[in-house]
Image (cartoon, grey):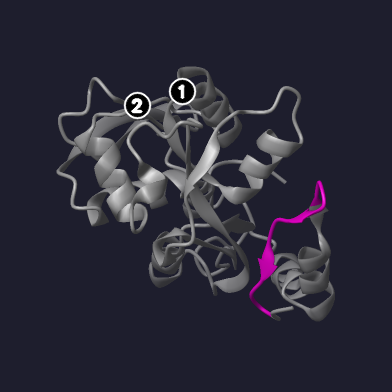
Amino acid sequence: MIAKGTGAAIRDGMDGNVDIIFVHAKAREDKFVADGYGTKRYAVMHNDFIIVGPQDDPVGVAKTADVNAGLKAIADNKAQFISRGDDSGTHTKEQFLWKESGVDTFVNKKEIVKSGDKVTVEFTEPADSADWYRSIGQGMGKTLTYADEKGAYTMTDRGTYIKYKFGKTPPVELEIVSEGSEELANPYGIIPVSPDKYAHVQYDLAKSFAEWITSERGQKLIGDYRLIGKQLFYPDAIPQ
């Protein structure tokens, strides 16, 4: 098993470097299958994303109607916002939300390293945000820690927030300021890489794993899993 962000995992699947991918960016997953790289997307589970920020919530995100209004308040007030900026599933969702929020955006081209080679990728970011928007190219834990140190806002999956808020000493002081919007849903899917595209992949094993994790046994394990007494994921193949 290799733990990577969604973007890197999908690229590994497209290159035939893995047998199966387990990711959370549904539009990109559907395209992966439509382009012939994967055989089928199996819906596995979901949790949700949240916006977190300083305890005093200086721009009043918690008072806004939904996540789009909250992000617009952050942009309008030029409040510090920390982005993962790593092409992960979380970063993909964040880019989508900025576009949906009505905030002016632009496409920023950046170089990342893929299999030892530099590759140019395009990220959507708020326009005219150089003095308040920080894209740090890090995982969720480091992004939460950095946002906490800077007294900034950020977007995170709820599970990582629970870990860093209730399972870490000292905990982050960031508080949830926006949650519950439909746009913050975070579904996970698993996709075997197509043997028609790459004959060397272990498709039978990949398919067996996908069928197991979406079976009654696999779904119960997901639904029963707790961190610090809190449920992290909710089964989608066989809802509990």
**The C terminus - image quarter:** bottom right
x and y percent of residue 187 in the render?
Answer: 54, 64
**Quick one: label 2, few (<14), some, or many (20+) residues within 10 Å?**
some
Q: Position of residue 157 (x, y in %)?
A: 56, 48
Distance (Cα) linking label 1 and label 2: 8 Å
Residues at badges 1 and 2 in contact (C-beta under 8 Å)? yes
Q: Position of residue 52 (x, y in %)?
A: 49, 40
In the image, which residues are magenta?
227-237
Q: Residue at x 40, y 62 (%)?
A: 183
- On screen, residue 114 versus residue 129, left or right, reads right
The circle drawn on residue 151 is 1
**Dot 1 amino acid type:** Gly
Question: Residue at position x 48%, y 55% from top?
Answer: 179
Q: Nearer the viewer, residue 237 or 28?
A: 237
Instruction: Say if residue 124 shows up in the picture.
Output: no
- Residue 24 visible in image: yes
Numbered tag placed on residue 80 in the rendering: 2
* Local secondary structure at mark 2: loop
Callout count: 2
Query: Element type at marker 1?
Result: loop
Where is residue 84? Give x, y as percent: 45, 34
Answer with left or right where residue 196 lies relative to residue 238.
left
Dividing the picture into quadrants, the one containing residue 43 is bottom right
* Image height of 35 relative to 119, above or below: below
Which of 112 and 160 lies nearest the eye of the viewer? 160
The image quarter containing residue 154 is top left
| Relative depth, front residue between 224 and 150 | 150
Residue 83 left/right relative to 8? left
